[in-house]
Image (cartoon, grey):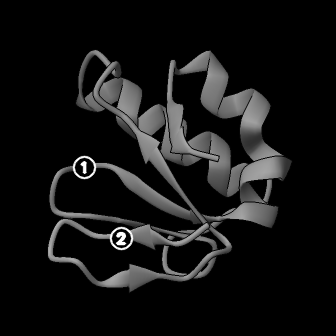
Amino acid sequence: MKLQSSRGRTLHEDVVILDTSEIADYADYGGMLYELKKIGVRDGEAYQIDNCGDLLMYRDAYRRCKHILEKFRVKALCD
């Protein structure tokens, strides 16, 4: 399956788009990023944050940190 951005560009098929809209505030968002960093999942290497605040994450990194993301109510839009 190919994922496409809102501009119609095809994204890498090993990328998972994660919806972060359920995170209550910036403190929780920062807490989630800190927990990811503690297990070695780092911004720019394993994921990127898009302009809307959603995460674009490589599938292997997503599998490693899925339990952390679920604690913060982050859901995969396409898995």
Compared with 10, 59 (above or below) is: above
**Mark number for residue 44?**
none
**Residue shown at 63%/72% (left/top)?**
46
Quarter location, residue 24: top left
Quarter location, residue 55: bottom left
- Mark 1 highlights which residue? 53
Q: Name the side, left or right, on which 10 lies relative to 53.
A: right
Compared with 75, 39 (above or below) is: below
**Residue shown at 73%/62% (left/top)?**
59
Residue 13: image location, x then y, percent: 62, 76
Q: Name the side, left or right, on which 63 lies relative to 15.
A: right
Query: Judging from the image, what secondary structure is the residue with disc 1 in?
Result: loop
Toward the viewer: 10 or 66? Answer: 10
- Mark 2 highlights which residue? 4
Q: Quadrant of the N terminus?
A: bottom right
Find the distance from the CA under tag 1 to the CA under tag 2: 17 Å
Toward the viewer: 3 or 68? Answer: 3
Q: Amino acid at mark 2?
A: Gln
Q: Amino acid at mark 1?
A: Gly
**Residue shown at 74%/37% (left/top)?**
66
